[in-house]
Image (cartoon, rainbow, N blue to C red):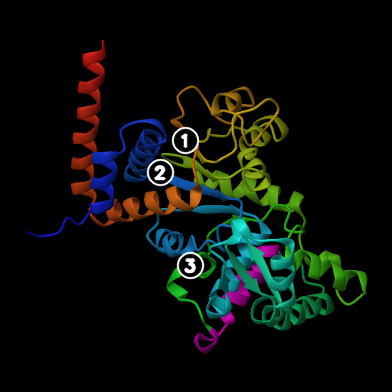
Amino acid sequence: MAQSPLPTLEFVARNYKNFNARATRDALFAYWDHIRGGGRMYWAVAGAMSSAQLGITLAPAIRAGLIHGLSVTGANLEESLFRLVAHDSYKDFPEYRYFTKRDDTRILKDRMRRVTDTSIPEDEAFRAVEKILVPMWKRATERGERRFWHEYFYELVQAIKPRSHEGDPSECWLLAAAQANVPIVVPGHEDSTFGNIFASHVKCGECSANIVKSGIEYMAQLYDDYRVLSKGKGVGFFQIGGGIAGDFPICVVPSIKYDLQEKAAPWAYFCQISDSTTSYGSYSGATPNEKITWDKLTEQTPMFVIESDATIVAPLMLSALLECQANPKAADAIIKASRAETRKALAKRG
């Protein structure tokens, strides 16, 4: 018997019936509806998703045209690069929940930086990249150049020779984004290892702080990017985690409308995967409805909240979407049948 070309999509359609599983299924179906109809999708990625190797599915999704813009933390940006150049030197710690302070002190002495159950090797990652990136900053200082933070990384990741790759380049989302020149913002990039390294060189007078464009300039650029991305069927917003990676770009719509006093299409889709519980005053834990009051979403916007672990949910959704992109007619049929089953179940209730 021939294997189905859409096993992940079929699995989700068959098994994801209720609770967070239902939210995952419905968000996946709506994502595909949006892309299938000619829409675009903007991703906001917080946390340490690059260290968790989201690039395995994120990179091919970028190449397949399933992701059209990105907002990422400085940590996620640099950690995608680290996985490319130092993958074999990472160490994993599956028993991290039982570690003592002494255990973590030993990891520090081994020149490793633990991220939950894995760790970034200082010498093979930070120091190896530093040798390339710092001279780039110094040259920009000498020439009086000004660039966005990600532009230095876009240039660097494409300049690294294949012989220096320890990770699979097809799984490096930063490389895929750079090659496709995907529009990207890195809000709060100062809050990252290389943000700190850059600050130290500015403090010592070796680099000018002016060679990196500011977060305000990122927003000004996002105005232009959003106008392009939102044409036609519009652009959706897919958010992993909370914090500035999501808060910064989603504000572009009300800013265009109220600050620039120009027309702006609303976000055409919204989904957030987060383990932040809904709570008073928590932006990351706010329900999508609250965003209606800030004119970021509307009553008609398809909205989904998946309260789960993004390292589990995001690769699953991306895998299914890649299947859909490769087999659109078959995907449409599976989704149509699943929705018909759901309508039938709802009709029984009525």
Residue 268 is tagged as: 1
**Residue at image mark 2:** 39
Q: Residue at x 45, y 76 (%)?
A: 168
Q: Which residues are magenta?
A: 148-164
**Front-most of 262 and 156?**
156
| Marks 1 and 3, the one that precedes in the sequence | 3
Which element type, helix, strand or loop, lies under badge 2?
loop
Q: Kindly indicate whether the residue at mark 1 contacts the one at mark 2 (C-beta within 8 angstroms).
A: yes
Which x, y percent locates residue 15? 27, 40
Alpha carbons under labels 2 and 3: distance apart: 20 Å
Q: Kindly indicate whether the residue at mark 3 contacts the one at mark 1 (C-beta within 8 angstroms).
A: no
In the rendered structure, which amino acid carries the disc numbered 2? Gly
Residue 171 lies in what quarter of the image?
Answer: bottom left
Q: Nearer the viewer, mark 1 or mark 3?
A: 3
Rendered position, 169 above or below 25: below
In the rendered structure, which amino acid carries the disc numbered 3? Ala
Residue 154 lies in what quarter of the image?
Answer: bottom right
Q: Residue at x 64, y 81 (%)?
A: 124
In the rendered structure, which amino acid carries the disc numbered 1? Ala
Instruction: Specify the farthest residue to the left.
Output: 1
Residue 176 is tagged as: 3
Which element type, helix, strand or loop, lies under badge 3?
helix
Q: Residues within 10 Å of mark 2 (few under 14, many from 20)?
A: many
Alpha carbons under labels 2 and 1: distance apart: 8 Å
Q: Residue at x 55, y 57 (%)?
A: 49
Alpha carbons under labels 1 and 3: distance apart: 25 Å
